Amino acid sequence: MLALTTPYLWYTTRATGLVTLVLFTMVVSLGALVANRAGGTVVGRFEINELHRSLAVAAVLFLAIHVVTTVLDSFVPTGPASVIIPLTSSYKRVPIALGTVAFDLLLAVWLSSLAKARLANATWRFLHWFSWLAFATSLVHAVTAGTDARHGLGLVVVVVCAGIGAGAGVWRVLARPPRAAGRTALSPLSGSPSSAPTSASSGVPRPPRSPSRGPR
Ligand code: HEM
């Protein structure tokens, strides 16, 4: 097989790993704000929800680059299967397997959000909790597999991400509001016609207009 390695692939793997972790921290923290219905007049719930989604897309893109450069770079012989199947990497077997588990959990979260219109709300909520598990697993992956994440600035980034994520997780559970009557808005990528209008302040689908209030 063709052996492909350049320092650029290796640097990209390391840099995108850390960028993905930072984005992932922002995504779970914003997710906690959305779930606990935080937001006011300065930054509304709709804006927080949109930021949560946009950063999630950015995190997925950086994660994709992270795994593609890993697989292409023969300097780290992980193999393509290690992206999906844990414990198949011959390089840092267990630390890479933790990254794989985080990847699989995120895949479940992502696919369930795309299929949100077709899922029961309880199923979608259950699968969305996987993102916390994925976040925790990816932190352990970073400190066990990482070259930069164990020293100096890299370690500072990981510790700050862990602190913010843990704080958001604890606040998410302790400040949990009573369950809202409606469901949260559908992903714009879900392609469902029912994903259309949402209330600007809450991100929750608007109830149908009363016919009596329309123009006569
Ligand atoms: C949510 C999923 C993941 C996140 C957030 C993540 C994040 C990270 C971070 C922060 C690092 C440390 C970078 C450094 O210190 O140099 C890292 C290293 C690494 N990750 Fe991931 N990763 C994930 C999934 C994966 C997967 C699925 C694979 C394999 C297919 C993988 C392969 C690697 C490799 C090869 C390294 C470098 C190890 C080394 O420096 O020797 N990661 N990752």
Image (cartoon, rainbow, N blue to C red):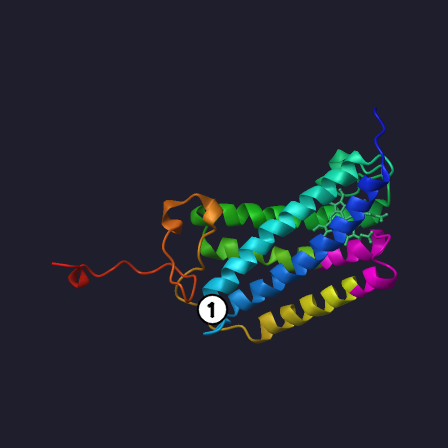
> Which residue in the protein does label 1 denote?
44
Q: Quadrant of residue 131?
A: bottom right
For the view shown, which residue lies furthest in the left direction? 216
Q: Relative to 95, is 152 above or below? A: below
Where is the N terminus found, in terms of image quarters?
Answer: top right
Q: Relative to 142, is 156 above or below? A: below
Q: Position of residue 5 (x, y in %)?
A: 85, 34
What residue appears at the point 54 percent right and 59 percent down from the top-left corner? 51
Q: Quadrant of residue 72?
A: top right
Q: Position of residue 25 (x, y in %)?
A: 67, 61
What residue appears at the point 52 percent right and 66 percent down from the top-left corner? 35
On the picture, is 81 further left or further right than 188?
Answer: right
Q: Relative to 50, is 100 above or below? A: above
Asked if residue 154 is among those painted magenta in the image, a careful observer would answer: yes
**Is residue 126 something one can see in this rendering?**
no
On the picture, is 177 further left or further right than 98?
Answer: left
Asked if residue 87 is among those painted magenta in the image, a careful observer would answer: no
**In front here: 186 or 197?**
197
Where is the C terminus found, in terms of image quarters?
Answer: bottom left
**In front here: 25 or 83?**
25
Main secondary structure found in the magenta portion: helix
Amino acid tagged 1:
Gly
Please, what secondary structure does the residue beneath circle 1 have? loop
Q: Position of residue 149 (x, y in %)?
A: 83, 57
| Magenta residues, start to end | 136-156
**In front here: 199 or 139?**
199
Total numbered circles: 1
